[in-house]
Image (cartoon, rainbow, N blue to C red):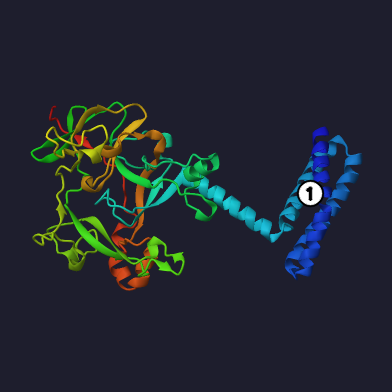
Amino acid sequence: MKSLSQSFLKLSTTYQGKREKFKHALDRMKRKGQLDLFQKASTLFENAEIQLHNLKAEFSVVSDGQINALRSKVKSFKKTYKELNEITKPELQQWIEAVVTALFLAVILRNFIFGLYHVPTGSAEPNILVGDRIWGNKMAYYISDVKHGDLVIFDNPEFVYDTSNSFKYYWQKYVGFAIPLLGLSGGPDNWVKRVIAIPGDTLEGRIEDGKTVLYRNGLKVEELYVNPYPLVRIRKDVGFIPFDHVGPLSIPSFLRKQKVERNYTYDPSKSFADQPFYNMTEEEVVRKKSNNNLILSPAFSPQYMLAVDYGQSIPSMGMDGSEVLYTIDKFGPIIVPDGKYWMMGDSRKNSRDSRYWGFLDKSLIHGRASFVIYSIDSEEAFWLFDLIKHPIKFWTKHVRFNRFFKNLASYNGKTSHEKK
């Protein structure tokens, strides 16, 4: 009984402290002509007043046998008070609370439950294409471990956070989008790569018969998921506005009309009009100036670069002063440390992965790529631009209906019995 009495005293005190606020809110509704809202709020206020008056009287004479009935009436009064308190809030306050609640839920869902990811590059072709919108399962690794062959979503490991103050750091880490007017920068890009090696694995990259191969724990890995097609250089037109400024105002880069060059997966057995992965036309193909041939990057061929581009620890000049080329596909043997993973893109000639930046820390992993929600072949910042430019072609050529809800279940890379 004492506990119930204290609970009612606290509730009644809170209500009576807001009584004048409720009256002012009713007057405001009436002045603004919000008659339906005014009627509902008035009824709640009258009920609350009656319930409070009756409960005060009953608490003075209640017996032990009447406690359950009294507890039910206190609960009813509490419900009436909450409804009245909510309905009498100013509209601005209700909007602010709704936005804050929505942002809070979005942050929780985005960081811990699932994520929706737009694919801007072809590093995982042909399994994942530019323009795919992917569903990422962020709960996958709460109940299971990262496995060989998983398509994992993670933060760009080369991203540098703004640590000038804690708010900016946590904004980048958990919210992610930029608000330049408030001095808030965006967070790291999300990448999707294949898990090649997990903690404890010994991994080695070799060149055999002019082709790239991997050995894991002494066994050659049969990577059936690696892109078997060459890449071709394509030049696309993007944007709308053919100039950089309007008076003193700078046109955002995504609106400027410009040409961009990309390397796309290309099936040499088919014409440009019949390519299975991307829309291509003869006019968009970039050719060598010397002989007018296509600019192709064959699958499984080593990728070479200047030593100075590969890393400061490697000398950039040979003994005779000539520039030295290194292949990023020849490395190891290396042992993957605890809490680290070795990641590589399925399209090896078009992927910046562990061959460049080393091991991926487990803390950067978001989850596992589950399936493609929808897919639109577009290099525009927003696919709506392509819809505006090509309202008919957009539906017949750009929308990849055959990729909607495509399963991206992991494939565990097999190892042959070929010994080291």
Q: Nearer the viewer, residue 117 or 303?
A: 303
The quadrant of the image that shows the C terminus is top left
Can you see residue 149? no
Q: Position of residue 365 (x, y in %)?
A: 39, 39
Is label 1 in a helix, a strand or a loop? helix
Q: Nearer the viewer, residue 418 or 125?
A: 125
Measured along the vertical axis of the image, is residue 180 above or below residue 1? below
Q: Quadrant of the rendered structure where residue 380 is?
A: bottom left
Taking the spot 24% from the left edge, 64% from the top edge, the residue there is: 279
Residue 246 point in image, percent of width and height: 44, 69
Residue at 28 percent of width and 67 percent of height: 397
Residue 201, given in percent of the width and then of the height, sits at 27, 28
Q: Position of residue 112 (x, y in %)?
A: 47, 42
Q: Label 1 belongs to which residue?
A: 77
Q: Nearer the viewer, residue 104 or 70?
A: 104
Residue sitting at x 20%, y 57%: 233
Instruction: Give the left or right position of residue 245, taking residue 72 as reference.
Output: left
Residue at image position (27%, 35%) is: 312
Farthest residue to the bottom: give it: 392
Rendered view: 357 above or below 254: above
Query: How crowded is the residue under tag 1: few (<14 C-alpha within 10 Å), some, or many (20+)?
Result: many
Quarter of the N terminus within the rendering? top right
Direction from residue 218 to residue 239 in the image, left or right: right
Q: Quadrant of residue 253?
A: bottom left
- State the image quarter where residue 94 is shown: bottom right
